[in-house]
Image: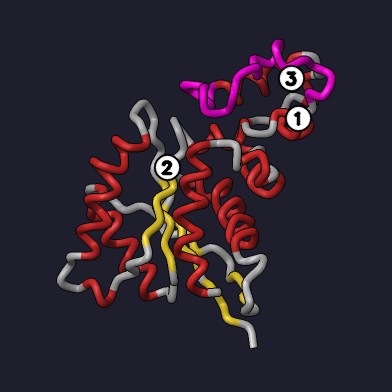
Amino acid sequence: MSEFLTIGLHAEGPTDHKLLKHIIRRTVEDIILNCDKDIEINPIIEIDKISGSYNQNIEHAAKEAFDSGIKCLILHCDADKSTIDHVMYHKITPAIETIHNHTDKTNMCSNLIPLVPIYMSEAWMLSDIELLKQEIGAERIDNATLGLTRSAESYADPKATLVEAIRISQASKSRRHRNFNISDLYIPLGQKTPLTKLKQLSSYQQFYTDLKSICLPYC
């Protein structure tokens, strides 16, 4: 008989949910590939942000996760201009400790996994340039013209980099076909970006390690 694994995602915004829920599912599938048990992964459950402090958001998410039967809750937080260590020390670790020390912790999900991309989640969308070029119809445009010549985690504003690459790719098309924008990329890149490309990114490597430590006991 199959065992079911339910995972939740608390992300910064709607586009992060669109991208990350597909990457998370494929990552879990990769981790449990050689499990002795037959494990099925339920659809990723999205937990939206609420108004309030970061700690209040995580407390709310942990309660929602518990009530929804979520086994592990992923906490997405972009590093922006900070380092991953800074975000962990000042935001995520204190929030996790609050849950673990909470008087009502038995009614909260305690398996909390950080997901902190360098700068922002859009950096992960730059991990496979050839796939990106296919998605934006820019196969015949060289990388330098598109401004895509650096490693994914080295762009200070990966979202702006993507927007500019799309703009350049659309410039040679007729006005009737210039209807593509960055919002069209989150789902396909979340579904198609090879894990082998993501595994070259330090932030994904850390996420993979943390997620693996939580998922393997279910094997």
Q: Residues within 10 Å of mark 2 (few under 14, many from 20)?
A: many
* Quarter of the image that includes the C terminus: bottom right
Disc 2 secondary structure class: loop
Q: Residue at x 62, y 79 (%)?
A: 37
Disc 1 secondary structure class: helix
* Quarter of the image that includes the N terminus: bottom right
* Disc sitting over residue 116 in the figure: 2
First in sequence: mark 1 vs mark 2: 2
Q: Quadrant of residue 145?
A: top right
Residue 25 among those drawn in magenta: no
Furthest-right residue in this view: 140
Most foreground residue, 161 or 27: 27
What is the spatial separation of the Cα atoms under label 1 and label 3, in whole angstroms?
13 Å
Q: Residues within 10 Å of mark 1 (few under 14, many from 20)?
A: few
Query: How far from the left and from the top, in percent, is residue 176?
Result: 79, 24
What is the spatial separation of the Cα atoms under label 3 and label 2, in whole angstroms?
29 Å
Q: Which residues are magenta?
A: 138-160
Q: Is residue 6 visible?
A: yes
What is the spatial separation of the Cα atoms under label 1 and label 2, in whole angstroms?
24 Å
Callout 1, which amino acid? Glu
Q: Residues within 10 Å of mark 3 (few under 14, many from 20)?
A: many
In front: label 3 or label 2: 2
- From the viewer's perspective, is residue 42 above or below residue 2? above
* Disc sitting over residue 130 in the figure: 1
Callout 3, which amino acid? Ser
Residue tagged 3: 169
